[in-house]
Image (cartoon, helix red, strand yellow):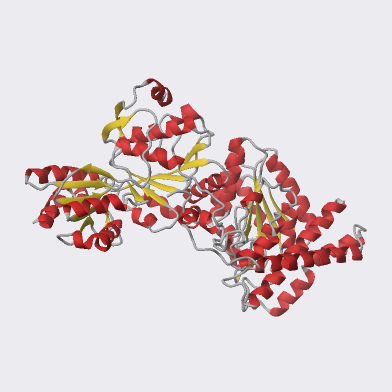
Amino acid sequence: MIDRVVAIDLYRVMRRIRRFEQRSTTLFGEDKIWGTIHSYAGEEAIAAGVCAHLRDDDWITSTHRGHGHCIAKRADLGKMYAELLGRETGYCRGRGGSMHIADTSKGNLGANGIVGGGIPIATGAALTAQQTGTDQVAVSFFGDGAANEGTFHESLNLAAIWKLPVVYVCENNQYAESLPVSKAFATDDLASRAVGYGIPGVNVDARDVRLVYATAGEAIARARAGGGPTLIVAEAYRHEGHYYGDPQHYRPKEEVEIWRATFDPIINARAWLTSDGVATEAEIDAVDREVDEETEAAIAWAETGPIASPITLEEIYASY
Amino acid sequence: MPATEAAATEAPGATTELFYADAIRDALRLEMHRDPRVLILGEDIAEHGGAFQVTAGLLAEFGPQRIRQTPISELGIVGAGVGAALTGLRPIVELMYIDFSGLAIDQIVNQAAQNRFMFGGQARVPLVVRTQGGSGRGNAAQHSKSLEAWFTHVAGLKVVMPATPADAKGLLTAAIRDDDPVMFIEHKLLYRTKGPVPDGEHVIPLGKAEVKREGSDLTIVTWSREVLFALEAAATLAADGVDTEVIDLRSLVPLDKETILASVRKTRRLLVVHEAIKRGGYGGEIAALVAEDAFDDLDAPPRRLAGAETPIPYAAHLERGVIPQVEDIVRVAKELVG
């Protein structure tokens, strides 16, 4: 049975991510955000369940669909919105935008616009932990698409031979942009790839944050104790298109409706929180209200920030 | 005697004749003794001592945790270097041939070079990618290229190309201490060249060219192995009454514009020489810089002498024919002053 405080916090983090994405979408529609954004809606249980085990001095690498990881790693929502709005007060002072948000103070080594780009970087962070003899761990989040990039293979092998304290979390949201997993893999069991590297591999249903939390807890504890890397494949469904405005010609509307109705880790959590007597409907409603209020406060703060300042050489080179 | 002890006991200003490869190893050893955060990742760098014997003996001295021999995974190991650099180490990743950098290019260009900027200045990436390029050993097209121009075109990278053993030691020391990613590009035919190298700590700041020979009639700007060719050509030219100044850039990025412009304003003629293919080569950047900033000081149009626009061929006579030789430099220099 999951601890009550942990359970409610997992719900709160998932709800915070969902609300962040909903409001990002409306801000995009109001032309306040430009470029591109990729919604994490539907996959919240992965970031929440994994990051609940991480300390501020543990590292993560994230993806183009990175808002959820950033929030789960306890980023400041105001600074995230300020980045999306191109403000000086944003995490990256308006230089990076949605696809490059990083918060090194919380161990977030960045979203990444290159599919699979973060996998070796997390591996290198784990190398730092091993080299300096700390018990820090690194987690790399990436999608099913990235599992077919060369970085996946090279990094998992390197971490395996060196027993690095890193956990690879493959978020299988069923589509690599427009390509369904059925056309990208000749197996349904993506975690079986771990066998080839001599490391543990496990599939987990990311509809239920409790399962993700338990699976990640085991893998992270093993990494922290010097037991080496793990591959976790979290099965999820991407509620929205690949990017905001994606016409989604590659999947039928009915499919999306069915999956949204049956695969929603937040609705799922609300159900078990109440049925298991962890929290009452009223208590969960209160969490929802708090999240909505903090989100609006974050947006309001972000909108008052000054626009991004001119670029200086010092941010391109530390010394020149 | 370990180099650190040598530094403590020998007189200031003392030098030792070293091969270029040994000078590089000297810098690696000194920095690894000085800073426990420095480690080396690369293929065949342990018992084998590296493809060019640069890391020979380092495994015995520093152990397998700091001399990390890796599988053949260029993308993975450069990426691990980026991650290690972002989190507090000072990794040196050896890419056996610069031709293999294509396998690792995403981590060099999209990650290492841009992390600091993309993150709004939050990050430092003190990563050195040590590699070597150039032709002249019959290694043919996939092991002989001069690709420095690729990397000079990426904001966020520094590009260093030493020509002498002393410069190799001093510049590598500076590169390891630098908080930005540095492409440190050696030349396979320089490893067995010899020269005096300062004992003990030797640091040459990045971004400082060196006038390797002073002259008044013509400025040759060059780097890496062509520096040796240019100096040989200058000796021949001197016998024919042409007084040539030879500038070794040493760092392509940052670029020492002042030294180039001061020289050209004195000699009023510019010849840029490099081994890399002329089209899109860094020589075009130097020529354009001089044309923009010192056009009125020139007595002749800037000239470029560079590699032929071909993959590097195998046969010895063909290989020699596609990069500038001493006699080519002499010929073009005479045309320029004539």
- At horizontal 24% and vertical 44% (from top left) the residue drawn is B211
- Residue A278 lies, in percent from the top left, at 90, 57
Query: With respect to residue B52, does B314 lie above or below?
Result: below
- Residue A214 lies, in percent from the top left, at 78, 51
Left or right, B116 with reference to A209: left
Query: With respect to residue B28, does B73 lie above or below?
Result: below
- Residue B311 lies, in percent from the top left, at 28, 57
Q: Which residue is more in the foreground, B335 or A237?
A: B335
- Residue A5 lies, in percent from the top left, at 85, 52
Residue A240 sits in quarter: bottom right
Residue B300 sits in quarter: bottom left
Q: Which residue is more in the foreground, A234 or A302?
A: A302
Query: With respect to residue B116, does B279 lie above or below?
Result: below
Left or right, B125 with reference to A211: left
Q: Is residue B274 in view?
A: no
- At horizontal 50% and vertical 43% (from top left) the residue drawn is B71
